[in-house]
Every structure is written in C-alpha cells, then in structure tokens.
Image: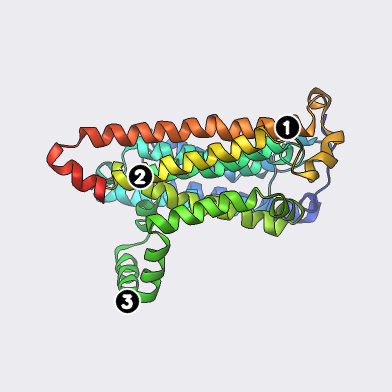
Amino acid sequence: MIPEKKYDLRKTGKNNQQNRGMDFFVLFVNKFFGGFIIGNQLKPLLMLSLMLATPSAFGHTPGETIDSSWRFEPEVVLPLLLTVTVYVSGIFHLQQQGIRSRIVSGWRCSAFALGMLALIVALMSPLDLLGEFLFSAHMIQHLILMLVAPPLLILGRMDVVLLWTFPLPLRRLIGHGWRKAARLRFTIGLLTRPVSVWLLASATMWFWHIPGPYVWAFDNPSIHILEHLSFFLTSIAFWALALRPFSRDKSGHGTALMLLITFAMESALLGALLVFAGHPFYVVHTALSRQMPYFLSNISPLQDQQLAGLIMWVPAGLVQLVATVAVFADLLSIPQERRAGSVES
C-alpha cells in the first residue's frame, strides 16, 4: 500500500464548511432544475454535477489510504462544478428556445460530459496522488489534460453553450462589449493564430518536461496548478483549430492536418528521448521510489521513465493519428471544387 500522506485540506473545520456549501448547492440544483423535463442526453450532465457536489466522493476521510481515496480541493472542484452548472443552464435555455437540437445535439452533450469526467479523473482521482510516486502516472495525467479532455470539450461546443447561459439582454451587452474591445480582440486573435497556437502548445509541452521546471512544479503547488493550466489552455486552443473541420463551416483542414502531424512528431520525439535515456531525468521520483506500494516495488525509476515515454509515444500518438485520419477523411468527403479552399484556410 502507498503510505498515507497528510494534507491541510483534511482539517475538520474547513471540510465542514465545504460540506455545508456543497449541501446548499445540491438544494439549489434541485430547486432550479426541478421544474424542467430532463432528456436522456442531459442526464449525464446532471449526474456529473451532483457527483462533483458530493464531497464524500472526493474528500479524504480519516483512515483512508492514498490508493483508494479521491482528492477534494476547492481550487479544483469549484471551477469544475461551476462549468458543469453553467453548461447545463445553457442547454436548458437552448431547449426553451426550441433550438437545442440544431446547436448542440445529444452526442455533443455526451462529449462534454466525457470531457468533464476526464478532468475529474486527471485532477481528483487516485491517479493524481499516484503521480507523486510514479512519473508514468504523472505522464498519463498530463496526456489527459492535453489529448483527452480538451477535444471532448471542444466537440461539446462548450463556448456556444456557456454563452447561452445568459439572458438575451446580457448576451447583447457581451457582444457589444466584445465589438468595442479592439485591443482584446487583436490580442486573442494573435494568440489563436495557427502559428501562435503551435508555438505555445509545443513550448508548453517541452518546457514542463525539462527536469528543472518539472521539479519546480512538482515541489510547488501553485506552480503545479500553473503547469496544469498551461497544458489545458494551450490544448484547448490547439484542438479548437484541429477540430475546426468538423464545425459548421467545414474549413481549416490544411491547418488541422499540419498541427496534428507536427505535434505528433514532437510527442514521438519526446517519448523516444524518455524511452532510450540511459538514466532517470526526474530525481524527485527517484527519491520517492522507496515508498511505492509492494506491487510496484520492482519498477525502477529508469523503467518508470521508459514506461512514461512509451505512453507518450504510442497511446498519445494513436490519439493524434486517429484525429489526423478523421480530418483527412472529412477533407475527402468535401466536393472537389471546395476542397482547395478548405486546405488553404
């Protein structure tokens, strides 16, 4: 068994306050959504919301060990909970307008729910705690934040649904403010250009896997949060472009293919460096290897690093390969007279 570790968040007084707050949220959800008819495609979203609102599912309790417990940390749970709540509210507003099926189909709602579940697994499950002992587990966590949750959330049309949470006057006010914010639009436009997105995503992946920054994030909780945020946000921007061919305008195939192919090559290169290295790069895991559970005690730090490299190389490469094939197949389905424009866009 992995030895039990103590966390400040397990203090009884703080947990009692969190429990009362979550109980209030459950009552709010029941009151707010109780009068609506919930379709089958929305049930996973509400179940996800209620699961996030239950601290006993994620909090450590006295006597639990790391390998069987979930982490309940407000800075993780509350943003996830808020996102699910706002998304469900947007779905209901679209349903009231009678346009939900045209904007967000049932499978897109399911994609969003799966994306949120992926974030829960990465940030709150025992995987997060195991990542403190095994570099390979930490690598799985990073790949979920980069290759699993972001594309699912993009497919769930999260941006559109979240906007529909607000009433019409406020949506108009947001649109008016956006049109007037020329500098903000220019900055966001610059950061979301294909070259900028590729550079930011690549730099983020390589920087946080350099031993120095990796140990820095490992030893500092605030920097660790920054690391995860940078992985997630740059990946959201990356997959927004990579999945653009599956949007309504059916464009951007050339950009998507270039992003997916080049990033897959970078991931494979990083994986190969980890696999064929002659010594472990990350000394923090070497120091903790003696505390691993007995069923993992035969894995040396170098073997752990090689396993992480294989995960980065093969499963991650498979995700990118599937996405590349899907984009290329969609390009071939476009009429020939429109195909050249989609490749160039």
The disc placed on residue 182 is: none
Task: Evaluate if marks 1 and 2 touch, with contact meaning CB atoms under 8 Å apart.
Answer: no
Report if residue 42 is visible in the image. Answer: no
Task: Evaluate if marks 3 and 2 touch, with contact meaning CB atoms under 8 Å apart.
Answer: no
Location of residue 67 (image quadrant): top right
Q: Tell me the distance, in whole angstroms, between the alpha carbons under discs 3 and 2.
A: 30 Å
**Image position of 261 with respect to 81: above or below:** above
User: Residue 9: x and y, percent?
Assistant: 76, 52
Q: Write the residue at 54% across / 30% down.
A: 315
Location of residue 43 (image quadrant): top left
Q: Nearer the viewer, mark 3 or mark 2?
A: 2
For label 3, the crowd category at 10 Å Cα-Cα, with few meaning under 14, some 14 to 19 and many 20 or more, is few
> Quick one: label 3 or label 2, which is nearer the N terminus?
3
Query: Is residue 333 left or right of 158 when viewed as pictured?
Result: left
Q: Tell me the distance, in whole angstroms, between the alpha carbons under discs 1 and 2.
A: 33 Å
User: Residue 171: x and y, percent?
Assistant: 32, 65
Report if residue 85 is visible in the image. Answer: yes
Query: Looking at the picture, which amino acid does disc 2 mark?
Result: Ala
Q: Write the residue at 63% across / 57% down.
A: 226
The disc placed on residue 180 is: 3
Task: Evaluate if marks 3 and 1 touch, with contact meaning CB atoms under 8 Å apart.
Answer: no
> Quick one: label 1 or label 2, which is nearer the N terminus?
2
Residue at which label 1 appears: 304
User: Residue 143: x and y, percent?
Assistant: 57, 40
Q: Write the residue at 76% across / 33% down.
A: 302
Residue at which label 2 appears: 256
Query: Looking at the picture, which amino acid does disc 3 mark?
Result: Lys
For label 1, the crowd category at 10 Å Cα-Cα, with few meaning under 14, some 14 to 19 and many 20 or more, is many
- Quarter of the N terminus within the rendering: top right
